Image (tube, rainbow, N blue to C red):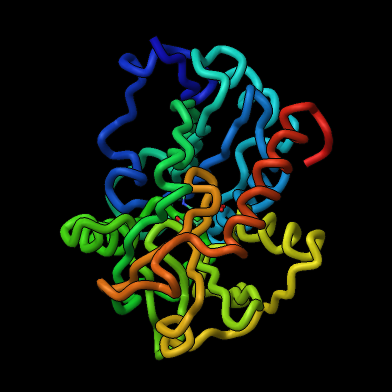
Amino acid sequence: MAIVYLNGAFLPLEEARIPVLDRGFIFGDGVYEVIPVYDRRPFRLRHHLDRLQHSLDGIRLANPLGQSEWQTLIGRIVADAEWPDQGIYLQVTRGPAPRDHAFPKVVQPTVFIMATALTTPSAEIVDKGVAAITAADNRWLNCDLKTTSLLANVLLRQLAVDAGCAETILIRDGLLSEGSASNIFMVLDGVVLAPPKSNLILPGITYDVVLELAAAEGQPHAVRPITEAELRSADEVWLTSSTKEITAVVTLDGQAVGSGRPGPVFKRLYGAYQTFKQRVMRGRND
Ligand code: PDD
């Protein structure tokens, strides 16, 4: 039975309970992280904890734990889980309080950590890619915060599922922002392009890794605003996330992207990403 951490205790998932007045439940008043773990080694843990701090600062909630406390708790969940490859999900909410939009005077945050089995893209998905649709980005203007208020993302992702696709790629004011649960890259004339970090996209940890690998590989790349027209004329489109790693998007709104198959630049960066993961698993720096 999976052991989770909740507010100071380690207990079976089935026994973990929160009060119904928890502001995470009532208002979606909380933040979260998803951290991939390969062979029981958390990938880029410090970066995820730094982003958690950014999200907590953004919602004006004090971090209930220090970095080393987070590392210790996550280490114990990782060690006890049944799978070597895991996705660590952690969440901090503003805790239980009588229902009132304004912050409670005394905040008792809820802290929850669990591990799930990590399923990275199958060989078939790596080989064939996935389909995506586009939609207008109707989310709020603090998309750099990883908050549990995900209703817009949920509705946008469901559009993709309804269309038999893997992801919804979001366009705001004629520019690419990101996916409903991923960052988006494209390749145009041999150059990897990514939209700049701003309040309109989540600063993806995988996004950073992909840009670092592109630099290390001598792969031409640029971070700049990407127009919808450029996205539609891309030679390659990829999505990136902690669970999807790098996945090629081969159709966009039913139209083939480039050749309609994962492209050569994807293959190069996907290979570099796998090599990088192996290094992490062997305990080298991530
Ligand atoms: N989502 N953008 C959004 C909106 C996301 O939800 C995610 C990740 C990303 C990619 O970030 P990263 O590379 O740090 O995983 C970008 C996670 C996996 C989730 O909500 O399950």
Residue 88 in the image, given as x and y percentages of width and height:
52, 32
117 vs 19, left or right, is: right
Residue closest to the far front: 259
Nearer to me, 21 or 238:
238
Nearer to me, 99 or 269:
269
Residue at 65% from the left image edge and 56% from the top image edge: 269
Would you say residue 106 is visible in this rendering? no
Residue 70 in the image, given as x and y percentages of width and height:
66, 32
- Residue 129 position by quadrant: bottom left
The N terminus: image quadrant: top left
The C terminus: image quadrant: top right
Residue at 61% from the left image edge and 72% from the top image edge: 197
Residue at 70% from the left image edge and 63% from the top image edge: 211
Would you say residue 6 is visible in this rendering? yes
Residue 24 in the image, given as x and y percentages of width and height:
36, 45
Residue 15 in the image, given as x and y percentages of width and height:
33, 14
Nearer to me, 28 or 206:
206
